[in-house]
């Protein structure tokens, strides 16, 4: 579905925009980091806004779009956390993700 694909792509950009500087960029001036992050985030908005419009036009509610976006955000961040930041994934992360999947089930139930 185009909505999900666009949300995944937008979240990849936003995760990079928010967290790229934690690995190797901590010595850069904060204003520079903010400006670079804003530039990256522009691409995120160019994908997220159409994703939400498409989803809403196809019958998703605002709540469904938000819950789906949050789950995608955490999936993308989980991959980024392990692959880029080198942080371990633990059973607590997986438990939290399972709870979010429950939230998705509740919000889409009966739709």
Image (spheres, grey):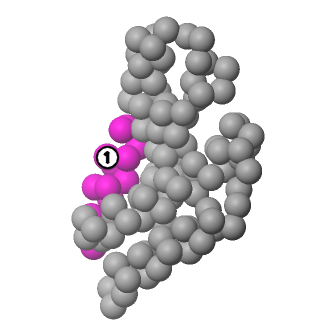
Please give the name of the residue rendered at 48% of the width and 62% of the height, measured from the top-left corner: 71
Please give the name of the residue rendered at 33% of the width and 91% of the height, measured from the top-left corner: 110
> In terms of depth relative to the viewer, which is nearer, 50 or 8?
8
62 versus 38 height, above or below: below
71 versus 78 height, above or below: below
Find numbered disc 1 in the image and state the secondary structure of the residue it sits on. helix
Task: Categorize mark 1 by other alpha carbons within 10 Å: few (<14), some (14-19), many (20+).
Answer: some
Pinpoint residue 105: horizontal percent, then vertical percent: 43, 82
| 97 relative position to 56: left or right | right
Pinpoint residue 10: horizontal percent, then vertical percent: 46, 44
> In terms of depth relative to the viewer, which is nearer, 42 or 27?
27
Extreme bottom residue here? 110
Residue 110 visible, this angle: yes
Tell me, yes or no, whether the highlighted magenta stretch contains residue 84.
Answer: no
Pinpoint residue 36: horizontal percent, then vertical percent: 47, 18
The residue wearing badge 1 is: 49
Magenta-highlighted residues: 45-59
Q: Main secondary structure of the magenta part?
A: helix
């Amino acid at each position: 579905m185009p909505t999900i694909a666009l949300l995944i792509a937008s979240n990849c950009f936003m995760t990079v925009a928010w967290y790229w500087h934690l690995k190797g960029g901590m010595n850069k001036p904060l204003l520079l980091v903010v400006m670079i992050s804003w530039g990256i985030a522009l691409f995120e908005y160019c994908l997220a806004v159409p994703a939400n419009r498409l989803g809403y036009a196809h019958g998703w509610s605002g709540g469904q779009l938000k819950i789906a976006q949050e789950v995608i955000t955490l999936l993308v961040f989980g991959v980024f956390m392990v692959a880029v930041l080198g942080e371990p994934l633990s059973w607590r992360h997986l438990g939290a993700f399972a709870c979010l999947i429950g939230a998705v089930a509740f919000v889409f139930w009966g739709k």
